[in-house]
Image (spheres, coloured by chain):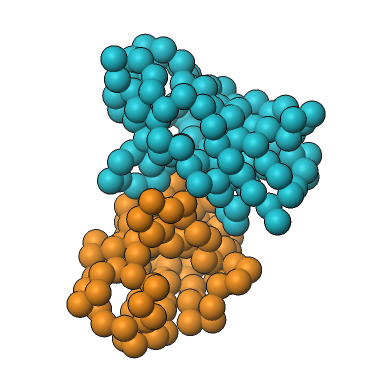
């Protein structure tokens, strides 16, 4: 059974870098694209970007200058880094299997940006 | 960027009723790269429909999707109590892959 689990700090200070990891079990990182999606509290969904295991990435232009998505095939993990965060980056962050989201999602992790 | 507009924003219905949710795109989608998700409170979205009309694994056949071009619909033929949730459409034909703002289905 495919499972995704996000992890990382729940609180990040303004102007710092948000760093999250998604650990995948039940599927090989090498076989699929993987996406990050976020959802501010009480609001809708925003696709952040995706990655293929070879390193090919595609980012949302609205975040492109601040986002890095990477993959660690040895750990079967995908990582998200978002720099220079502000309160507007407070959201539940999800990782998901697929180029756009798709059939398997993690439970999500809430990241709050606050001093 | 393709903007998806969902209507209505909120629907109040009773179990057993039939419902059709709408998702309209600001420009025609290449092929039928449109998905529908269901999201319940404090849960991740659940994929219902992909490719505009393909039912995801394990999704009951009371859920169906249709449409092409700029107009898409999700139909629930007979509402069950567990179907009351927020529904999102998403286009994945043109990056960035955008979501609609959601339609909330609430119990009347």
Quarter of the image where one finds residue A52: top right
Residue drawn at (26%, 70%), measured in percent from left and top?
B106
Residue B94 seen from this side? no
Task: Give the x, y percent position of residue A71.
Answer: 69, 29
Residue B42 seen from this side? yes
Residue drawn at (25%, 78%), measured in percent from left and top?
B13
Residue situated in front as seen by the camera: A98 or B98 = A98
Q: Is residue A41 above or below residue B75?
A: above
Residue situated in front as seen by the camera: A25 or B56 = A25
B29 lies left or right of A76: left
The chain coloured orange is B
A96 lies left or right of B39: right
Quarter of the image where one finds residue B61: bottom right
Residue sitting at the far top: A15
Residue drawn at (68%, 52%), measured in percent from left and top?
A2
Task: Give the x, y percent position of residue A102.
Answer: 58, 53
Q: Is residue B36 above or below residue A21?
A: below
Number of numbered discs on residues: 0
Q: Is residue B64 above or below residue B69?
A: below
Which colour represents chain A?
cyan
């Amino acid at each position: 059974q495919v499972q995704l689990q996000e992890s990382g700090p729940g609180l990040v200070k303004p102007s710092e870098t948000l760093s999250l990891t998604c650990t995948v079990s039940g599927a090989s990182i090498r076989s699929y694209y993987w996406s990050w999606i976020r959802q501010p509290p009480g609001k809708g969904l925003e696709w952040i970007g995706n990655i293929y295991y070879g390193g090919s990435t595609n980012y949302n232009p609205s975040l492109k200058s601040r986002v890095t998505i990477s993959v660690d095939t040895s750990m079967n993990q995908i990582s998200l880094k978002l720099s220079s965060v502000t309160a507007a980056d407070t959201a539940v962050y999800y990782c998901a299997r697929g180029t756009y989201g798709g059939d398997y999602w993690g439970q999500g992790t809430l990241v709050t940006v606050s001093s | 960027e393709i903007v998806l507009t969902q209507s209505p924003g909120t629907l109040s219905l009773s179990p057993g009723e039939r419902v059709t949710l709408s998702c309209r795109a600001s420009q025609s989608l290449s092929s039928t790269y449109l998905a529908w998700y269901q999201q319940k409170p404090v849960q991740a979205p659940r994929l219902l429909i992909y490719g505009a009309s393909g039912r995801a694994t394990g999704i009951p056949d009371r859920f169906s999707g249709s449409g092409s071009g700029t107009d898409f619909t999700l139909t629930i033929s007979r509402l069950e109590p567990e179907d009351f949730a927020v529904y999102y459409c998403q286009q994945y034909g043109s990056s960035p892959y955008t979501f609609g703002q959601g339609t909330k289905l609430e119990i009347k």
